[in-house]
Amino acid sequence: MSISTPHQTSGTTITTVVTATLSQRLVAAVSAMFLGAFLVYFAGFSHIDAVHNAAHDTRHSSAFPCH
C-alpha cells in the first residue's frame, strides 16, 4: 500500500510516497488494538475514581450506553 502526498513548493510539485508492507500494517493494527483495549479496561476497571468517572462521563456525553 502506498500513500502519495503532493507538496507545492515555489511552483514545483514534489510527491512523497510512503510504502508500508503487510507486516508493518499488521504490527500497527495489533498495536493499536492492544493500546485501545488497555485504555478501555484501565478506565473501566480503575479504582481511581477520577479516571473511572471521567471515562463514565465521556461515554454518557457521546450517547454511548455503559450500564
Image (cartoon, grey):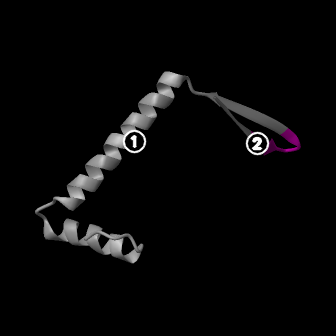
Q: Please give the name of the residue rendered at 28% of the width and 55% of the height, measured from the top-left corner.
A: 40
Q: Residues within 10 Å of mark 2 (few under 14, many from 20)?
A: few
Q: Quadrant of the C terminus?
A: bottom left
* Circle 1: residue type: Ala
Residue reaching furthest to the left = 47
Q: Does 30 sit above or below residue 41?
A: above
Q: Element under label 1? A: helix
Q: Quadrant of the N terminus?
A: top right
Q: Element under label 2? A: strand
* Circle 2: residue type: His
Q: Residues within 10 Å of mark 1 (few under 14, many from 20)?
A: few
Quarter assignment of residue 10: top right
Q: Does 18 sit above or below residue 61?
A: above
Marks 1/2: CA–CA distance: 29 Å
Query: Which residue does the numbered mark 2 point to in the structure image?
Result: 7
Image spot of residue 46 (x, y percent): 15, 60
> In front: mark 1 or mark 2?
1
Mark number for residue 32?
1
The boundaries of the magenta stretch are: 6-12
